[in-house]
Image (cartoon, rainbow, N blue to C red):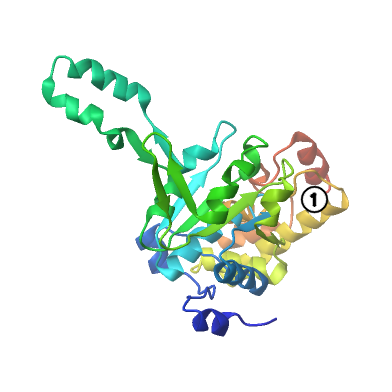
């Protein structure tokens, strides 16, 4: 795989290396360890070089959302997350205009003359959204547009101009804002809806594969550095066996990396000898891993 570090350096751009986040940094900045694959690191650097959004897909719980924050931390850049809901509109990410508050202030201004100047200044009622702040920021900013497929089908197309030209207009004032430095944009999707071709054409794409056994072990070790290697090995082994059974059984919802971390957080609270013995028998704390009654019946019955 070609190394983009030299290419980015020649173009005056910093590259992402996937440098591990230390336990001290996690405590200081409220982060969690993130271990990207070489392929994912390469995809991030392609997005930085081409100045295109990076669309990330993968199973829920595979780390799509946390990548943007890890990149922002390593590159020491501002971070603007935008968590999409079913009611989200594209303009919400750019700015919102509080017409109701202005009307309220206008009514008060009839009594208080001093408030009239505030009402006349529309900037007092405009609040920038995550993407708007990123485009306005003098410093290059990392933007996360999380779970874009939750929004209406027209939502991605409504962002085409802003993502393409990296500028937008505040309609109420006529002010046009152009990004002095293009943001690094990450878009995540759980594939609940197909995204429009016009939107996909403007993005790079990477599918985050589920970690293999060795990667799972490294992920658990990074999150729980003080834990016993024997306990990590046994827990990952049992988790992997469960997931393989789910894959053979074509379960709709397979256990995820985030659930493994939650499960291990519980396991390590008990004496190691007791937990190791439990891991050889009936699956301990199945509530953390099995989220459907059918799965409880199927995988607990055949767990031993």
| Residue occupying image coordinates x 57% and y 51% | 262
User: In the image shown, does 204 or 107 lie closer to the viewer?
Assistant: 107
Q: Is residue 184 above or below residue 252?
A: below
- Image label count: 1
Query: In the drawing, does residue 196 fall left or right of residue 112?
Result: right
Q: Which quadrant of the view contains residue 171? A: top left
Query: In the drawing, does residue 233 fall left or right of residue 48?
Result: right
Question: On the rendered image, what quadrant is the N terminus found in?
Answer: bottom right
| Residue occupying image coordinates x 51% and y 75% | 15
- Residue 272 locus on image (x, y percent): 57, 62
Q: Is residue 156 among what the camera can see? A: no
Q: Is residue 223 above or below residue 136?
A: below
Question: Crowding at label 1, few (<14), some or many (≥20) Cα neighbours within 10 Å?
Answer: some
- Residue 207 locus on image (x, y percent): 71, 60
User: In the image shown, does 52 or 211 lie closer to the viewer?
Assistant: 52
Q: Which residue is mark 1?
A: 303
Q: Is residue 126 above or below residue 303?
A: above
Query: In the drawing, does residue 274 fall left or right of residue 224?
Result: right
- Residue 235 locus on image (x, y percent): 66, 61
| Residue occupying image coordinates x 50% and y 72% | 20
| Residue occupying image coordinates x 25% and y 33% | 121
Report the residue that reaches farthest toward the front. 174
Element type where label 1 sits in the image = loop
Q: Which quadrant of the view contains residue 77? A: bottom left
Q: Is residue 289 among what the camera can see? A: yes
């Amino acid at each position: 795989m070609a190394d983009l570090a030299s290419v980015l350096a020649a173009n005056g751009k910093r590259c992402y290396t996937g440098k591990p986040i230390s336990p001290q940094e996690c405590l200081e900045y409220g982060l969690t360890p993130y271990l990207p694959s070489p392929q994912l690191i390469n995809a991030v650097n392609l997005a930085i070089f081409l100045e295109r959004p990076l669309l990330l897909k993968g199973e829920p719980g595979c780390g799509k959302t946390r990548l943007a924050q890890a990149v922002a931390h390593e590159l020491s850049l501002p971070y603007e997350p935008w968590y999409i809901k079913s009611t989200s509109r594209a303009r919400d990410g750019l700015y919102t205009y509080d017409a109701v508050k202005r009307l309220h202030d206008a009514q008060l201004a009839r009594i208080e003359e001093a408030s009239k100047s505030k009402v006349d200044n529309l900037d007092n009622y405009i609040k920038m959204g995550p993407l708007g702040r990123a485009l306005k920021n003098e410093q290059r900013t990392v933007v996360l547009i999380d779970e874009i497929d939750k929004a209406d089908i027209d939502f991605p197309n409504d962002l085409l101009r802003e993502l393409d030209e990296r500028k937008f207009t505040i309609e109420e004032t006529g002010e046009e804002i152009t990004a002095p430095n293009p943001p690094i944009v990450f878009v995540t999707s759980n594939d609940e809806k197909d995204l429009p071709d016009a939107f996909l054409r403007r993005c790079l794409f990477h599918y985050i594969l589920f970690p293999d056994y060795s990667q799972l072990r490294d992920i658990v070790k990074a999150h729980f550095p003080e834990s016993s290697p024997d306990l990590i090995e046994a827990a990952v082994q049992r988790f992997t066996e469960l997931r393989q059974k789910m894959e053979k059984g074509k379960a709709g919802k397979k256990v995820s990396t985030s659930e493994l971390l939650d499960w291990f957080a519980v396991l390590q609270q008990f004496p190691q000898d007791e937990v190791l013995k439990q891991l050889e028998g009936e699956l301990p704390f199945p509530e953390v891993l099995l989220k459907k009654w059918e799965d409880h019946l199927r995988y607990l019955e055949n767990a031993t």
